[in-house]
Amino acid sequence: MYRHAPRLLIRAIGEGGRRSAPSAVGVTRSFSTDVPAAPSEDAAFVEAWRKVAPNIDPPKTPLAFMKPRPPTPSSIPSKLTVNFVLPYQSEIANKEVDMVIVPATSGQMGVLPGHVATIAELKPGVLSVHEGNDITKYFVSSGFAFIHANSVTDIVAVEAVPVDHIDPSLVQKGLADFTQKLNSATTELEKAEAQIGVDVHSALNAALSG
């Protein structure tokens, strides 16, 4: 029976949608900043599950684990709350700052309190965190910045290192090595790999000189 559960669930949800769109797949989702105070369950999934396995409690869906996003304030806060995480550690957690500048693929992007909600893809470059007169700079390889309407910014990077921890001599050596590989590459794969190395080390070099 359970081998056919996914197919039966899909059919049950589809039938519910044809009978009454608002009660099933036609439900209109709220924006992330308008999430209700308490987490809610996926009513369409639960209804479909009970039709297939009425004697078994339905499993939790991702919606059940989502924490409600704080509401958008009526006035612009004086500070920006920043979270900056890597796959293996958290660099910044719920820290209030004046501004962050992220290396978006569209160019350097400054984020202040009250910034419009945006998702920005990051390219190799400098991420700077501004607190009064103090500026902390990180070199990030890639990632995303999730800028929320409630003046919270979540930054996720694949790799990052404080700029003052970078060895300039190793950057110059890496740039020279990848430039040589690019000039001698004979296949498209070799050219692509070498070009990535050149781009990253050029960005590292610019971070050190800037």
Image: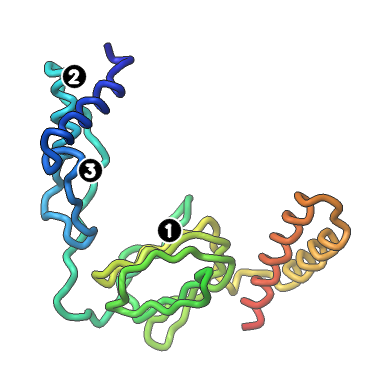
SS for tag 3? helix
Which sits earlier in the primary sequence, circle 1 or circle 3?
Answer: 3
Corner quadrant of residue 71: bottom left
- Compare residues 197 and 21 and report the one nearer the observer: 21
Hey, which residue is sitting farthest right in the picture? 184
Q: Position of residue 169 (x, y in %)?
A: 76, 71
* Residue 176 appears in the rendering: yes
Q: Position of residue 53 (x, y in %)?
A: 17, 18
Q: Position of residue 78 (x, y in %)?
A: 25, 82
Residue at 30% x, 22% y is 7
Tell me the residue at 27%/72% (across/down).
151
> Can you tell which quarter of the image residue 101 is in?
bottom left
The amino acid pointed to by label 1 is: Val
Q: Which mark is residue 85?
A: 1
User: Relative to 100, is 108 on the left or the right?
Assistant: right
Amino acid type at circle 2 is Val
Q: Amino acid at mark 3?
A: Leu
Q: Which SS class for mark 2? A: helix
Residue 200 bears which disc, if any? none
From this view, report whether residue 169 is shown above or below residue 191.
below
Q: Position of residue 136 (x, y in %)?
A: 48, 76
Of labels 1 and 2, the one closer to you: 2
Q: Are circles 3 and 2 on residues that touch, CB within 8 Å?
A: no
In the foreground, 185 or 138: 185
**Marks 1 and 2: CB-CB under 8 Å?**
no
Q: Residues within 10 Å of mark 3 (few under 14, many from 20)?
A: few
> Dot 2 corresponds to which residue?
52
Q: Can you tell which of label 1 and label 3 is closer to the viewer?
A: 3
Q: Is residue 44 left or right of residue 156?
A: left
Q: Residue 63, which numbered label? A: 3
Residue under the image location 19 percent in, 33 percent down: 45
